[in-house]
Image (cartoon, helix red, strand yellow):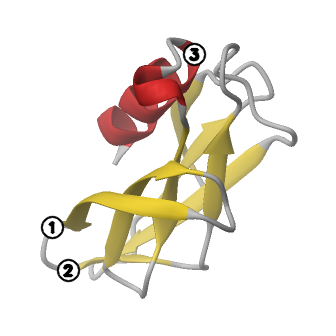
Amino acid sequence: LASDLALAKISSRDAKDQKAWGVVSTDETHYQILAGTVANNTVTQTRTLDEGITFADQFSVWFEIGSGGVLNDYLIKLGAMNGQKVGLSVSKNGVVQSQSL
């Protein structure tokens, strides 16, 4: 997930295909990499989290075309069956970092 968020940021920053790029959860264990806009997009890839890992909440992160930044800071929370909780933060400048929760 972290590498896909970074890839979406780079694709938006570089205006790949002249589109913005985003990563959006579709349920507790799946997410999609999208190109376009929030309202009008194309799914480029669908991914599944490793077995036993789930999203705590739904999320939608869109990176701005040309800058790779986002409008707000985001924290994507993930949980494992063993009780471990991890977060992926996306700062306004588009930097993706993992952190323990």
Residue occupying image coordinates x 62% and y 68%: 59
**Three-letter amino acid code at disc 1?**
Asp
List x then y, in percent, for residue 32.
Answer: 36, 64
Q: Determine which of the numbered discs, if any, sits on residue 50 in the image.
A: 1
Query: What residue sits 57% from the left and 15% below the top?
Result: 13
Q: Nearer the viewer, mark 1 or mark 2?
A: 1
C-alpha separation, residue under disc 2 versus residue under disc 3? 33 Å
Distance of label 1 from label 3 (alpha carbons): 28 Å
Q: Which residue is mark 2?
A: 52
- N-terminal label among 1 and 3: 3
Q: Where residue 1 sits in the image (x, y, percent)? A: 34, 48
Secondary structure state at the residue bearing disc 1: loop
Most foreground residue, 42 or 73? 42
How crowded pointer 2 is (Cα within 10 Å; few <14, some 14-19, many 20+) is rated as few
Q: Which label was assigned to residue 10?
A: none
The one nearer the camera, 49 or 35, is: 35
Task: Report which residue position mark 3 lands on.
Answer: 13
Residue 81 is situated, as x and y percent measured from the top left of the image, at 28, 82
Say what secondary structure mark 2 lies in.
loop
